[in-house]
Image (cartoon, rainbow, N blue to C red):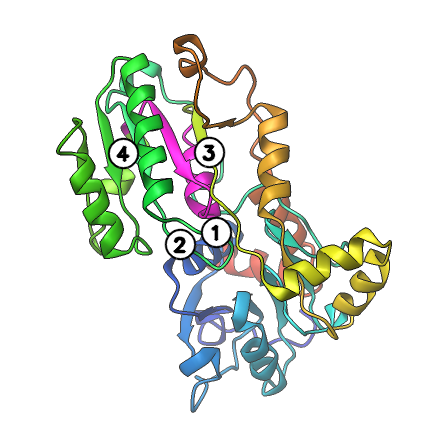
Amino acid sequence: MGGYDLSPSVLSAPVWILETGRPGEQAQCQILAQALGLPFRTVPLGPNFSPPDQWPETAGLRLILSFGNAVQAACALRATCAVRPLLVHIGRPSHIPAKDLDLIIPLPQDDYPPGPNVLRVAWPFNGASLPPQHEEAQELRHAGTIVLYGGPSRQFRMGRAETERLLVFAHALAQANRESLHIITSPRTPPEAVQWMRHWRTRETAALHLFRPGETLFTHFLNTGNRFVVTADSASMLAEAWRTRAPVWLFPLPQKQSFMSRLQQGVDRIGLRPLRSWLIRRGLLGSGSRFTCWHRALIQSGVIRLACPALTEQDLRWRPVHRQADTDLVRCQQRLLALPGLLPLTATTREKS
């Protein structure tokens, strides 16, 4: 097997996930690791995504999964290994040459150039499974209209005015479909937003559910909601709502424009995007995000709908007429298992289980 020691002690954890402290990122890494059918472990990083003071024993390590800012630590970990492990990165590998990674999986909101070791996906992995979930029977969905409220982010502003418009739209949506209205907050929802929602509830009827670590309300409403309204800041919540196969409405938010994002747009407008892509692939320039482009493509394809004022009751009863096939996870599984050295390891592990 390529000179590998395949004894059970070595194979205890051939896959390592680098812990960034961000639950959404870790969930996606775990979903991908589980799809491989190999044992995996999570290794915490130090402050600011730095390597820990000491790595665990690496004798059995064959695949490193990193996400976002963990890529620098992943490269440092690989450099310490006697047997070079594969390195697969989810998201944008900032300032790392593409050739240094075995596979890059940019998320749909990532502005990262194509390449031979780049595999694009249509959705984040949140909520993905093998095999993909089937549509729940409509009669089993009874919880009503569910608002998934994120919060301000690096890409979007979300203040009181946006919150008021969101709640007005969600209330109209629930009324048009003769359903109850539930609002679920997230880890990023600021305390002042909770106060705005509580104040709004003094005028209208809705149930407000605050995020608490360890609670399962989010999963409960994903499984029972008739339709969802998702704020534009959260790609992960949008993916989880879409995978329920219930109607999903995207609530738009005003974008933040940083100096770098304006510079990148200007470079692209004057025809220098190929140069920018060349610099990104070589790790000389960081890449950005393209939330608006991704959202626009989803809306134009009809898989989700844009929440906006002045819609008729008939509009608000919308359901998608076709379903986009959910093939991301199986495509990634097949691509990873085809990487040199991983498929024999997978086969041996399954024989021993």
Residues marked 3 and 1 touching at CB (< 8 Å): no
Give the magenta-colored segment's residue range.
224-244
Name which quarter of the figure residue 82 lies in. bottom right
User: What amino acid is at disc 1?
Assistant: Phe
What's the distance in space between the residues labelled 3 and 1, CA to CA?
14 Å
Among the two numbered marks 3 and 1 on one chain, the one whose residue lies closer to the N terminus: 1
Viewer-nearest residue: 16 or 172: 172
Query: What residue is disc 3 on?
Result: 250
In x, y percent, where is residue 186? 30, 50
Q: Is residue 138 magenta?
A: no
Residue found at x 85% / y 63%? 275
Among the two numbered marks 4 and 2 on one chain, the one whose residue lies closer to the N terminus: 2
Query: What residue is disc 1 on?
Result: 156
Name which quarter of the figure residue 105 lies in. bottom right
What's the distance in space between the residues labelled 1 and 2, CA to CA?
6 Å
In which quadrant will I find the C terminus?
bottom left
Q: Which mark is drawn over residue 221? A: 4
Residues marked 1 and 2 touching at CB (< 8 Å): yes
